[in-house]
């Protein structure tokens, strides 16, 4: 990802709201979504955010030309799969055409078409932006792995394979929902401490997991591998992902296989997809301490070493029923950065396909819980409370949480900031816990 004119920090838009300091969606961002006007029966279709507006891409396509017009036309349906399948050249053409038409002083058919097809973000509703054929959730934070491992395996918190492969499990795409949705506390079996047989009922150890959503663009044929050097060309963009987890159900069922009912009840994503190109200024080198295992050759590449890591600031907030009723701000409970992940996104893509597994446009990866090296950077409540033994305090009300309670809303936010470049925001992922059925 090379820097170009779309990363110019001095670029401004004729849309004033895109130039507001600290806003998520300046002209240098241009994230994709699927939307319609709230409360209407309009068809969902693709859009791009600019300031406090969203561009109705399919309707504005007539003002564009060439590959950019073809790409915009591909969004005039209730999923972005067709655009994603077109590949990086089409994604770039559309992004650059929009940037040029949105610049301050821009004139012409494309600018006129966009101005006529703006919808206020405050007046829209979203849906999951792709038809998710498959959802894979990774496990790539060594800090999270150690924190959780110490709870159940204090003498050997890391599994032997963690430092050799980016591990993952196949999740449930049908229960992925977009930000703003609510879900029921899951029912299931758990084995309470000291019990001799499991109990059935609502989960009492409900948790969140702070993750990135990684959206796959064009895929690979079954039986073919995506080499590490080419892996990033298969990633369309990024969002926020909350991998809700019922820890009591999860830990009981994960013997001997992996997550099942403890994870499949709900996954909440943000509605915006920030493109690879928008994040080009926020690449960092991938490093591994010299005294730790180095990746095997198929997971090594000079480009990945030079700029395989992403510098993305992330935070988690909890909004309790009490905060909501008193109109208090949510309490921040974690602040970390994606740069702490042990494996890069390119390594995840390469590992996923090394056996010939085929990825498809619109597939979703979860990055795995994102935790940093300090207690304040933990990406799940089970880490912060050491398995529920040390409840955390919520600023503003003084409430405590060992795990999530009914009525709690969890909000994930993300952004990139670097001197000499524009701030890039991810919006938010928000989900709320409802009581279990029958309670």
Image (tube, rainbow, N blue to C red):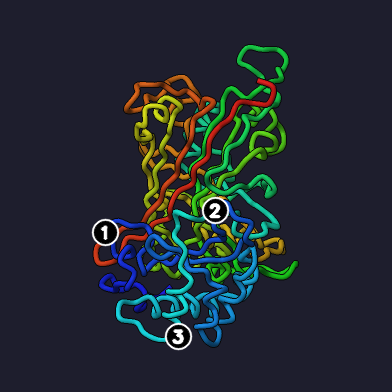
Mark 1 Cα within 10 Å, few/some/many (few <14, many 20+)?
Answer: few
Disc nearer the start of the sequence (2/1): 1
Closest to the camera, between mark 2 and mark 1, is 2
Please give left or right for residue 77 compared with residue 278 in the image: right
Secondary structure beneath label 2: loop
Alpha-carbon span between mark 3 and mark 2: 28 Å
Snapshot quadrant of residue 79:
bottom right
Q: Which mark is residue 21?
A: 1
Disc nearer the start of the sequence (3/1): 1
Q: Position of residue 305 (x, y in %)?
A: 43, 64
Secondary structure beneath label 3: helix
Q: Which residue is mark 3?
A: 109
Mark 3 Cα within 10 Å, few/some/many (few <14, many 20+)?
Answer: some
Disc nearer the start of the sequence (3/2): 2
Alpha-carbon span between mark 2 and mark 1: 27 Å
Q: Is residue 185 above or below residue 141?
A: above
Snapshot quadrant of residue 9:
bottom left
Q: Which residue is mark 2?
A: 38
Q: Residue at x 63, y 47 (%)?
A: 176
Task: Please count the marks in the image.
Answer: 3
Q: Residue at x 65, y 52 (%)?
A: 135
Q: Position of residue 156 (x, y in %)?
A: 53, 32
Q: Residue at x 66, y 62 (%)?
A: 353
* Residue 375 in view, yes or no: no
Mark 3 touches mark 1? (CB < 8 Å): no
Q: Position of residue 425 (x, y in %)?
A: 39, 57
Secondary structure beneath label 1: loop
Closest to the camera, between mark 3 and mark 1, is 3
Alpha-carbon span between mark 3 and mark 1: 29 Å
């Amino acid at each position: 990802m090379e820097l170009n004119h779309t990363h110019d920090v001095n670029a401004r838009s004729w849309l004033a709201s895109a130039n507001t300091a600290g806003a998520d969606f300046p002209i240098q961002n241009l994230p994709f979504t699927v939307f319609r006007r709230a409360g209407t029966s309009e068809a969902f279709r693709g859009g791009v955010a600019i300031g406090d507006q969203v561009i109705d891409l399919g309707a504005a396509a007539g003002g564009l030309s060439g590959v950019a017009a073809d790409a915009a036309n591909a969004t005039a349906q209730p999923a972005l799969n067709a655009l994603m399948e077109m590949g990086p050249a089409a994604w770039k053409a559309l992004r650059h055409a929009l940037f040029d038409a949105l610049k301050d002083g821009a004139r012409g058919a494309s600018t006129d078409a966009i101005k006529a097809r703006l919808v206020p973000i405050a007046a829209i509703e979203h849906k999951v932006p792709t038809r998710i054929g498959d959802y894979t959730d990774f496990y790539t934070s060594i800090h999270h792995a150690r924190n959780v491992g110490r709870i159940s395996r204090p003498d050997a918190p890391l599994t032997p394979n963690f430092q050799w492969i980016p591990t993952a499990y196949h999740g449930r795409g049908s229960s992925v929902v977009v930000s703003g949705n609510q879900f029921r506390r899951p029912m299931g079996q758990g084995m309470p401490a000291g019990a001799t047989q499991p109990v059935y009922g609502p989960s009492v150890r409900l948790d969140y997991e702070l993750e990135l959503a990684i959206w796959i663009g064009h895929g690979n044929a079954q039986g073919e591998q995506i080499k590490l050097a080419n892996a990033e060309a298969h990633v369309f963009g990024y969002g926020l992902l909350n991998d809700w987890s019922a820890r009591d159900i999860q830990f009981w069922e994960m013997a001997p296989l992996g997550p099942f009912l403890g994870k499949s009840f709900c996954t909440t994503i943000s509605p915006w997809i920030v493109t690879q190109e928008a994040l080009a200024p926020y690449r960092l080198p991938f490093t591994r301490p010299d005294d730790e295992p180095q990746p095997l050759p198929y997971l090594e590449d000079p480009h990945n070493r030079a700029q395989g890591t992403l510098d993305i600031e992330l935070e988690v907030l909890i909004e309790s029923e009490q905060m909501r009723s008193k109109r208090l701000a949510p309490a921040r409970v974690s602040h970390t950065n994606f740069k702490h992940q042990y494996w890069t996104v390119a390594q995840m893509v390469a590992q996923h396909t090394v056996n010939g597994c085929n990825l498809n446009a619109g597939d979703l990866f979860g990055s795995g819980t994102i935790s940093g090296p300090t207690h304040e950077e933990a990406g799940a409540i089970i880490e912060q409370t050491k398995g529920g033994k040390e409840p955390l305090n919520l600023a503003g009300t003084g409430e405590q949480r060992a795990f999530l309670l009914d009525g709690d809303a969890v909000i994930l936010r993300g952004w990139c900031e670097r001197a000499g470049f524009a701030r890039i925001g991810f919006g938010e992922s928000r989900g709320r816990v409802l009581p279990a059925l029958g309670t």
